[in-house]
Amino acid sequence: MQRHFHEELELVKEKTLRLGSLVETMVEQAVASLVDRDSRLAEEVIASDRKVDILDLEIEEDCLRLLALHQPAAKDLRFITTAMKITTDLERMADQAVNICERAIELNEEPQLKPYIDIPIMSQLSQKMMREALDAFVRRDADLARQVIPEDNKVDALKDQIFRELLTFMMEDPRTIPRAIRLILVSRHLERVADHATNIAEMVVFLVEGKNIRHAPKEAS
């Protein structure tokens, strides 16, 4: 019975990683649909959100069944509740990717306002945070999780930089306002992806140490 329980825990871990990989691909392709002006790719990403929703619900049902049948305690209980919260954050990351695609489709219909430099960098940083947070979850590595958290400061700084640059465009030429606002929204969606990665890292610390560090001040990177 105990062996079967731990096999099911491993299956939850595998499904969570599969979900993370799917979401990371969505974020990467969402930004590519903007940079490459590929609205067909954006539509494909939007359609793939259904796969995320299905897998999210599947993991949640697995976790609830484990809680009901085995009534786990201590570390196993923390693992299951952490997995449920992580999948929620991953599903919300996928929603942000969909939001980026919607803005990309709109922007691709108009002349490009400026070269996209900082947005791809934000995307790469956010994806790296996501990968490392999930790696920390799999390895139960609180030190790695803690290294992820201050990386959010870099994403925030890029978002602020993008806003200042686009504000200059809008002030100099009001005709750029609709495009500039959409790009600002893209940067905010990427910032939210990084925020969710930070949430996952904080939950990994709770999983490993039983210590809740949410809402603690961020360390400087």
Image (cartoon, rainbow, N blue to C red):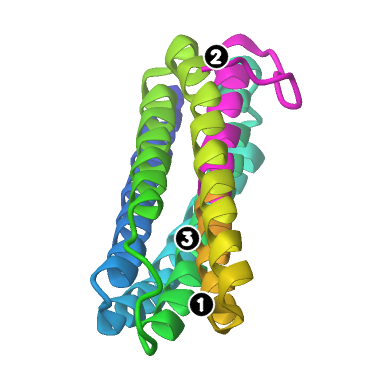
Residue 179, label in figure = 1
Identity of the residue furthest to the front in this view? 172
Specify which label sits upstream in the sequence, 3 or 2.
Answer: 3
Q: CA distance from mark 3 to mark 1?
A: 23 Å
Residue nearest the viewer, comparing 29 with 211: 29
Residue 94, label in figure = 3
How far across and down, in percent of the image, does residue 50 sit? 43, 73
| Magenta stretch secondary structure, dominant | helix
Under mark 1, the amino acid is Arg
Q: Report the span colored magenta.
A: 192-221
Is 106 on the left-hand or right-hand side of 84? left
**190 in relation to 54, above or below:** above
How far across and down, in percent of the image, does residue 29 sit? 29, 63
Q: Quadrant of residue 116?
A: bottom left
Can the viewer see residue 61 in this picture? Answer: no
Q: Residue at 33% x, 53% y: name it.
A: 117
Q: Residues within 10 Å of mark 2 (few under 14, many from 20)?
A: some
Specify which label sits upstream in the sequence, 2 or 1.
Answer: 1
Residue 208, label in figure = 2
